[in-house]
Image: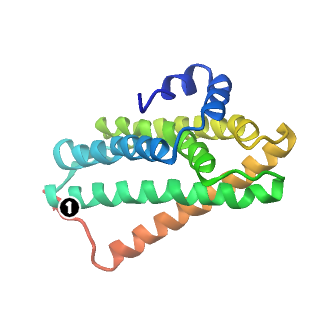
Amino acid sequence: MILNHIWGLYAHPKEEWQTIEKRHESLVYSLTHILIVALIPAVCSYFSAAHIGWQIGAGDVIKLTNNSAMIMGVAMYIGIVFGVFALAYLIQWMAKTFDSSPDFTQSLELATYTATPLLMVGIATLFPVLWFVAMAGLAALAYSVYLLYSGVPIMMNIPEEKGFIYSSSVVTCGLVMLVALMAVSAILLGMGFGTEYIS
């Protein structure tokens, strides 16, 4: 089954990382995992923006047109997949500094399974209230960081002390990439790729 590591990452993450490290599935396996799981936030965000509407504070419910919500959902999906691949590349590139030499498939596995909680929490957008989605997102981010810190020593075959520094470097690079992705989104919106609202 393609998504068979998800339960283990929540129930017993260290043991599951060891299982993932022993099996080392193919590149296609990791790619299929990320392509499926990345659909969760994209589809749920589209549905909530076009059909339910967002509630921000005590203001009116905000909805987007179907077309606008679809474009944003597709852009989100592409951005997520690109972000996970970029993170995998960074993981592989930084490994040399920490006396590890993973192949790209190992790096993609680490990036993919680390990002899984952040992507699965996209289901929270079906209750589109800003404070709720923000709290769910923070909890998922915290768990993703925990998965990264617990998975790096196992997947990269390095001691835990080096793994902590390596993980911290990956988290820093991941945050920089996230800010860059947000900046690109803001620039595109400013250039006329705006959204159409339903009043």
Residue 11, percent from left and from top: 57, 19
**Closer to us: 74 or 159:** 159
Q: What percent of the width, then of the height, locates residue 88?
A: 59, 54
Which image quarter: residue 122?
top left
How many badges with numbers are in the image?
Answer: 1
**In the rendered image, which quarter is residue 175 located in?**
bottom right
> According to the image, what is the colour scheme of the structure?
rainbow
In the rendered image, which quarter contains the N terminus?
top left
Packing grade of label 1 (10 A; few <14, some 14-19, many >=20) is some
Callout 1 amino acid: Ser
4 versus 97 height, above or below: above
Residue under the point 20% across and 41% down:
52
- Looking at the image, residue 76 sits to the left or right of residue 106; the answer is left
The residue to which callout 1 is attached is: 68
Q: Secondary structure at mark 1?
A: helix
Q: Quick check: 104 above or below 124?
A: below
**Visible residue check, residue 69:** yes
Please provide percent x and percent y for residue 78. Answer: 37, 59
x 43%, y 54%: residue: 80
Viewer-proximal residue among 150 and 16: 16
